[in-house]
Every structure is written in structure tokens, then in C-alpha cells.
């Protein structure tokens, strides 16, 4: 027999044994249940708070619409989370309201407001639910040139400066005169038109007297919440942008929005 032959039977291999060092398998079902329960605890309060937020926004919009006589309900956004704790305390920290087409309060000449955007701080309602009081408020009111034209009786458009409007005065068929007037703020939430100058055409003395009469009486804003004070007015592409602010601003749901005058 060849001495160099290897008998493979002489090579023995150890039998395979599983590695017992791995950790035993555990049941992960309790962990999944615990996580699900935690998520439910977080989601349910959020859903309840969102429901409460939507409800108070809807009620606020309805009350504002009734008080300001707008054709549609305004957009209302209650800021801050959670809202439930704010409701429990009786005061909403921050509320934003955007209303459109607020009509004039009477027929004596107040100017309609095309859009009113209000940011309220510390809003709470009265005990009889007939009014709401904000600790402070900032607002922007847009007065369209069309409404200005209807109120003044002459065609009003934007001037060349932020504090200026342009008026087109018809004197005769095919003969118009263009004048520029400076807009400013007076006490009592009034907008004044001063220092008008002819910028196009010839204005006879009788026309100048008539135009002076048109511009001599300031326009007073009456259809805004009580407590807001007119701070500035700027001529923009869409109309006059009036900035207002105030403290202890009152909203009434019985149709009495307040005169808005000092």
C-alpha cells in the first residue's frame, strides 16, 4: 500500500453546534401595544383641541358677521396650542380676523371697508355673550378707490406719492381736469384731503371752488370696531390702506360695532 495515501476517514470534523450566545427571542407584542397606546394618548387630545378650535373659530366668525353685517363670514384663526386651556381660562391669547365688504354703518356718507384684517390679543367675551373685548388690537383697512369715488363724487385714483391721490374732474364733454391731493389722518378716525394742485388741464375758478367743497369735509370711518384708532393712511394700487391700532377694542354681536370715532 502506498504510504503516501491519505485515508480521509482519519480526518474527523466536529459536528456543528448552534451558537448559544445569542439572546433569546422576546415577545415584542407588549412593546407595540405600549407604543400604540402612547400615540393614542398624544393624538386624541390634539384632535379634541382642534375640534374645539374649529368650533370657537366658527362661532367667532358668526358673531363678527352679525355685528359688522358682512355678506359672508370672515376668516378667523385662533393661534396658540392648546386652545382648550385658553377657553378654560376665558381668554384667547391671539386671534386673527379677516373680513371683506364691510358696509357703511348708515347713509350719511361713511366709507365702506373693502377688507379689514385684525390681529387681536387677549380676546374674552362678556358675561351676556353680546360682545367681545380684546386687550389690544392692530388692524389694516382697505378703502377702494371706487368707494372713494362714489363717496366724494369725483373719480379717485392713486397719486405719484404714497400720501397722495389723484382726482379726475369732468368740466365738459371731452374736457377733464386732473388734480392731486394729499391724504392725511385727523383725530376721530377721519381722513382728510388737503393741498390739491392741478396736474393736468385748466381749472377755472368756479371749478376750483367746487373741488374745494368736495375735499373740505374729511371722511370719517364709522364702521370699525370700537377702540381702534386711525394711525396712518397710504395710497396703494388697490386703494387707501389705513392702519389702525388700539387697546380695549370692543366687538358687539348685536349690530353695534361702534362708531370708531374718538
Image: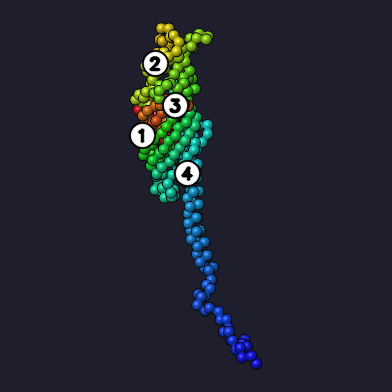
Q: Distance between the residues labelled 2 and 1?
A: 31 Å
**What distance separates the C-alpha of mark 2 from that of mark 4?**
48 Å
Residue 45 rendering spot, x and y as whole percentages: 48, 54
In this view of the protein, which residue sits in the foreground, 175 or 77? 175
- Identified at 47% across, 23% down, the residue is 145
Give the x, y percent position of residue 36: 52, 61
Q: Identify the residue at image location x=45%, y=13%.
A: 200
Q: Which quadrant holds the N terminus? A: bottom right
**Residue 190: quadrant of the picture:** top left
From the viewer's perspective, is the residue at label 2 or at label 1 nearer? 2
The residue that disc 2 covers is 196
Quote the CA–CA distance across marks 3 and 4.
34 Å
The residue that mark 1 highlights is 246
Residue marked by disc 4: 56
Q: Residue at x 42, y 50 (%)?
A: 85
Name the one closer to the observer, 201 or 218.
201
Tell which of 258 and 164 is nearer to you.
Answer: 164
Give coordinates of residue 171: x percent, y percent. 48, 9
Residue in front for this viewpoint, 260 or 144: 144
Q: Is mark 1 on a helix, strand or loop?
A: strand
Asked if the residues shown at circle 3 and circle 4 are in contact, with their CB atoms under 8 angstroms apart, the answer is no
Q: Which mark is residue 236?
A: 3
Distance of mark 3 from mark 2, alpha carbons?
18 Å
Amino acid at each position: 500500500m502506498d504510504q503516501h495515501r491519505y485515508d480521509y476517514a482519519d480526518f474527523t470534523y466536529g459536528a456543528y453546534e448552534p451558537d448559544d450566545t445569542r439572546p433569546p427571542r422576546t415577545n415584542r407584542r407588549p412593546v407595540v401595544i405600549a407604543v400604540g397606546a402612547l400615540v393614542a394618548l398624544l393624538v386624541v387630545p390634539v384632535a379634541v383641541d382642534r375640534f374645539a378650535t374649529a368650533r370657537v373659530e366658527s362661532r367667532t366668525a358668526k358673531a363678527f358677521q352679525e355685528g359688522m353685517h358682512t355678506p359672508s363670514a370672515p376668516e378667523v384663526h385662533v393661534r396658540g396650542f392648546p386652545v382648550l386651556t385658553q377657553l378654560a381660562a376665558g381668554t384667547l391669547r391671539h386671534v386673527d380676523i379677516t373680513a371683506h365688504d364691510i358696509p357703511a354703518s348708515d347713509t350719511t356718507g361713511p366709507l365702506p371697508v373693502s377688507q379689514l384684517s385684525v390681529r387681536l390679543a387677549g380676546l374674552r367675551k362678556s358675561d351676556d355673550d353680546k360682545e367681545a373685548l380684546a386687550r389690544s388690537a392692530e388692524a389694516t383697512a382697505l378703502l377702494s378707490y371706487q368707494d372713494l369715488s362714489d363717496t366724494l363724487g369725483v373719480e379717485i385714483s392713486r397719486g405719484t406719492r404714497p400720501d397722495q391721490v389723484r382726482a379726475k374732474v369732468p368740466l365738459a364733454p371731452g374736457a377733464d381736469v386732473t388734480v392731486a391731493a394729499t391724504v392725511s389722518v385727523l383725530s376721530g378716525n377721519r381722513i382728510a384731503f388737503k393741498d390739491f394742485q392741478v396736474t393736468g388741464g385748466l381749472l377755472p375758478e368756479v371749478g376750483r371752488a367746487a373741488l374745494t367743497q368736495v375735499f373740505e369735509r374729511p371722511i370719517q370711518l364709522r364702521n370699525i370696531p370700537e377702540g381702534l384708532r386711525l394711525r396712518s393712511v397710504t395710497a396703494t394700487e388697490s386703494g387707501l390702506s389705513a392702519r389702525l391700532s388700539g387697546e380695549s377694542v370692543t366687538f358687539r354681536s348685536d349690530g353695534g360695532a361702534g362708531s370708531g370715532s374718538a
